Every structure is written in structure tokens, then in C-alpha cells.
Image: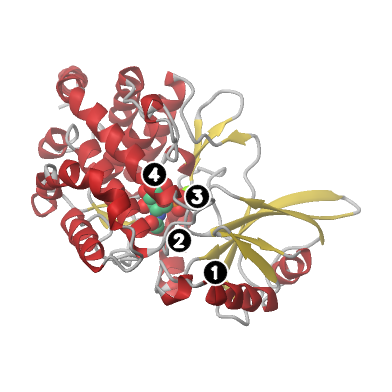
């Protein structure tokens, strides 16, 4: 509450300025000099040419940096890990390094890889305790906020399915939990109720029209019974914009944003794929009549996902697929609303009220999914049965 006071906002602004970057509207713009100095700490050659802030992620800061010399130029991705969200960046980077190396070892050379720091670490820690990582930029790819055609739905889902399968034989200890209880929907619901009752920002009245809708769906909190399902390494954040598709063929090239890759449940990945790919509009759409569930994309997505995972999935996982989009959409709606009630501390916002807009989009989408519940069941059953018939025994 206190931090949102205009005087504190100004104070924060000055602090940020001192750190050599400008922060406004949740998006931080870093000065060229700061970026040029940062990249010098990684094992790369070439002089700083330019940098561009990539504004799509809701949590970390991503910058595309161009370095070069007389022989030519090369692009890199530089990222600051949001340590307010990821409390143990070293452990996170340990996962990141194991996962990227394992995927590369399977011949997926166009997938993510880390550039070591000059001290031989997988990250660089700056004087303000910020953790940075650097990776070669992957060229000739596209990244979509909203799916434009069925091919996108098929390829993105196949890429995330392939990713789960690739990690099913990761050797060594289980990966670290980078955010414990990340998809604990009951806990997310509990946090929402707490925020509503504290009402620190005095925003409760603006959200009261959603109260009944949310309460009536509380049962979704326990609809995925994770304790009865296999624990696998999953991505946990399978948004459409977390996969790169080939610019020419549309084929999946690489899954990105690996911070939440950890032991979990495949249903959360499938649910989040559907949530983003089958939404006819984007996550902050103000005109809710444009937010609907796309059944054609759902069919393509299911095909792509099962083409990749049919030999890995167990029957009880397949049985849970159809409810998972509703759970994840509900969960994220609740998370956006909680953040709005708390004063927008978690998800980056580009304008005031964005988290409330985002929450409304999720709840509208959820309503539209409910209307297509039977169709989802039928599509999954049909696709699974047809694959089982031809499955080698
Ligand atoms: C965040 O960072 P990004 O934009 O890929 C969030 C996801 C949400 C998503 C909603 C670590 O993902 O859980 O589904 O925003 N990531 C984290 O757009 O909380
Ligand atoms: Mg992302």
C-alpha cells in the first residue's frame, strides 16, 4: 500500500535511475552503456552495436543484443532473472543448464543454449545482485501472441509434447523446484480470498461483479488430482509465445522460457497450451465479445500434442486432459485478479488496470470453454482411441 504512494513511486524511480536504467509501467529500459558492460562479463567476442528490449514476457527482462566486429555481427538474448519471483536463481540456473544440455545432446541444435560467464558460471551476478544469463539468439523464427492458423496450434503443441518426451530420460537428481506450489490451484484460490479480505489497495469493489462467477467454480481447485498422476518433468508455462516456430514452414523449432521447468504434471502443460492457443483474442483484450474458445484450433492442438506424447502418456493422464484447460484458465484468472487486488506486484503491467482486464479475459474464456466441454472430451477420446489402435504392442 505504502509503496504505491506517489512520493514512494518517485523515490523508486530515482533509485532505478541510479542503477542506470529507466523503469516505467512495469517495463524496464536499460541504457546502452549498462547492456554493453553486462555482455562483457560473458564469453563472447565482438563490440556492442545495439540492443532492443523485448516487451512480451510478464516476469523477466529480455533484451536482444547485437555484437560485431569487422567480420560481421551476431545477435544474442540477454535476460535478467526476476529474483522477486524466482527466489533461488542459482538453483534455477542449475536446472536451466541441465535441461538445455540434455535437449542439445538429442541433436536439437537450434534449441536454447547458455553462454558461460567469464568466470565459468551459467550466469553473471551484477553489483545490484541481479542475475543475468546470455544465449545465442535463434534466427528465422516467429513467436505468436495469438495463433493465426491451425498449423500454429498443431506445431506449438507438438513442440511442447516433444519437449516433455525429450526430458523423460534426463539423468541425475530431480530438478529443483523453482517456484514451489506453482500450479497448486487451491493455494492460488486461498491467496485470492486473502487479498480480497485484506483489500489493501481498496480495489475490491471494482472486482465484485466477478465474485459469484469465481465462487461457483471453486471445485476446479481440486479437479486435477496430481497425487494420483505420474510426476514428470514439465514446462509449466506453455504459452504460445513460449515456443519458436520456423518462419517459413511453421514447424516448431524450440521451446523457450525454461524457468519453470520442474517436476510436475502433464495436465498443467496441456491446459495452458489450450488456454493460449484456443483463445481467439489476446490476454489483455478489453472487448470481451472477441474472447472465445476456438474449436478448430483445439482439434489441431490435440493432434499435435498426442502425436508427440502418445507413447509416453498413461490412461489416467489422457482422461484428465479435457478438464485441464478449465483448471488452468481459472487458476490464471484468479492469479491476475489477486495481483490486481495486491497492487500489481507480480505481473508486469503496461497500463493501470491491465491485470483486471487480464482476469476478465480468462473468466470469459473459461465460460466459453465450459460451453465446449463435451466437444473437448469427444475430440480427445476420438484421437486417443485412433492412436491406441495403431500403437505397437
Ligand atoms: C507469466 O513470463 P511469461 O509471460 O512467459 C507467468 C505464467 C503466466 C503468464 C501469463 C513464472 O509467463 O505463469 O501463465 O505470465 N510466469 C510465471 O501470461 O509466473
Ligand atoms: Mg515467456
Residue at the bottom extreme of this rendering? 127
Q: Quadrant of residue 133?
A: bottom right
Q: Horizontal placement of 223 versus 278: left or right?
A: left
Nearer the observer: mark 3 or 2; the answer is 2
- Select label 1 or label 3 by which is in front: 1
Residue 248: percent from the left, percent from the top? Answer: 61, 24
Real-space CA distance between mark 1 and mark 3, rounded to the nearest whole angstrom: 16 Å
State whether residue 34 is above or below residue 76: below
Among the two numbered marks 3 and 4 on one chain, the one whose residue lies closer to the N terminus: 3
* Residue identified by numbered label 2: 96
The residue pinned by badge 4 equals 358
Q: Earlier in the sequence, mark 3 or mark 2?
A: 2
The residue indicated by pointer 1 is: 122
Mark 4–mark 2 Cα distance, whole angstroms, equals 29 Å
Front residue of 212/230: it is 212
Q: Earlier in the sequence, mark 1 or mark 4?
A: 1
Residue 312 visible in rendering: no
The crowding category of the residue bearing disc 4, from other C-alpha atoms within 10 Å (few below 14, some 14 to 19, many at least 20), is many
Amino acid at each position: 500500500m505504502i509503496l504505491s504512494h506517489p512520493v514512494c513511486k518517485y523515490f523508486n524511480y530515482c533509485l532505478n535511475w541510479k542503477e542506470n536504467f529507466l523503469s516505467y509501467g512495469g517495463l524496464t529500459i536499460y541504457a546502452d552503456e549498462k547492456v554493453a558492460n553486462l555482455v562483457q562479463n560473458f564469453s563472447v567476442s565482438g563490440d556492442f552495436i545495439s540492443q532492443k528490449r523485448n516487451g512480451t514476457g510478464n516476469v523477466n527482462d529480455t533484451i536482444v543484443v547485437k555484437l560485431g566486429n569487422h567480420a560481421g555481427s551476431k545477435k544474442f538474448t540477454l535476460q535478467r532473472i526476476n529474483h522477486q519471483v524466482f527466489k533461488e536463481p542459482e538453483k534455477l540456473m542449475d536446472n536451466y543448464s541441465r535441461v538445455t544440455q540434455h535437449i542439445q545432446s538429442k541433436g536439437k541444435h537450434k534449441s536454447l543454449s547458455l553462454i558461460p560467464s567469464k568466470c565459468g558460471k551459467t550466469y553473471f551476478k551484477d553489483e545490484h545482485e541481479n542475475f543475468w544469463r546470455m544465449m545465442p539468439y535463434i534466427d528465422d523464427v516467429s513467436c505468436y501472441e495469438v495463433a493465426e492458423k491451425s498449423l500454429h496450434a498443431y506445431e506449438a503443441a507438438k513442440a511442447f509434447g516433444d519437449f516433455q518426451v525429450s526430458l523423460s530420460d534426463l539423468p541425475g537428481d530431480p530438478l529443483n523446484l523453482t517456484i514451489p506450489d506453482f500450479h497448486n490451484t487451491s493455494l492460488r484460490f486461498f491467496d485470492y480470498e486473502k487479498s480480497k479480505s485484506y483489500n489493501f489497495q481498496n480495489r475490491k469493489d471494482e472486482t465484485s461483479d466477478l465474485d459469484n462467477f469465481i465462487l461457483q467454480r471453486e471445485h476446479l481447485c481440486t479437479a486435477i488430482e496430481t497425487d494420483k498422476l505420474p510426476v514428470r518433468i514439465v514446462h509449466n508455462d506453455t504459452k504460445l509465445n513460449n515456443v519458436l516456430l520456423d518462419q517459413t514452414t511453421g514447424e516448431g523449432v524450440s521451446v523457450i522460457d525454461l524457468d519453470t521447468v520442474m517436476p510436475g504434471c502433464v495436465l498443467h502443460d496441456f491446459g495452458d497450451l489450450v488456454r493460449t492457443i484456443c483463445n481467439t483474442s489476446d490476454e489483455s483484450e478489453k472487448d470481451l465479445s472477441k474472447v472465445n474458445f476456438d474449436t478448430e484450433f483445439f482439434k489441431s492442438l490435440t493432434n499435435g500434442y498426442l502425436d508427440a506424447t502418445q507413447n509416453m502418456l498413461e490412461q489416467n493422464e489422457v482422461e484428465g486432459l479435457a478438464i485441464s484447460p478449465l483448471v488452468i484458465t481459472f487458476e490464471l484468472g484468479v492469479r491476475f485478479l489477486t495481483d490486481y487486488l495486491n497492487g500489481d506486484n507480480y505481473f508486469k503491467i503496461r497500463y493501470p488496470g491491465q491485470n483486471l482486464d487480464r482476469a476478465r479475459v480468462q473468466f470469459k474464456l473459461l465460460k466459453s470453454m465450459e460451453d465446449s466441454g463435451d466437444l473437448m472430451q469427444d475430440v480427445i477420446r476420438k484421437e486417443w482411441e485412433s492412436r491406441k489402435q495403431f500403437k505397437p504392442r
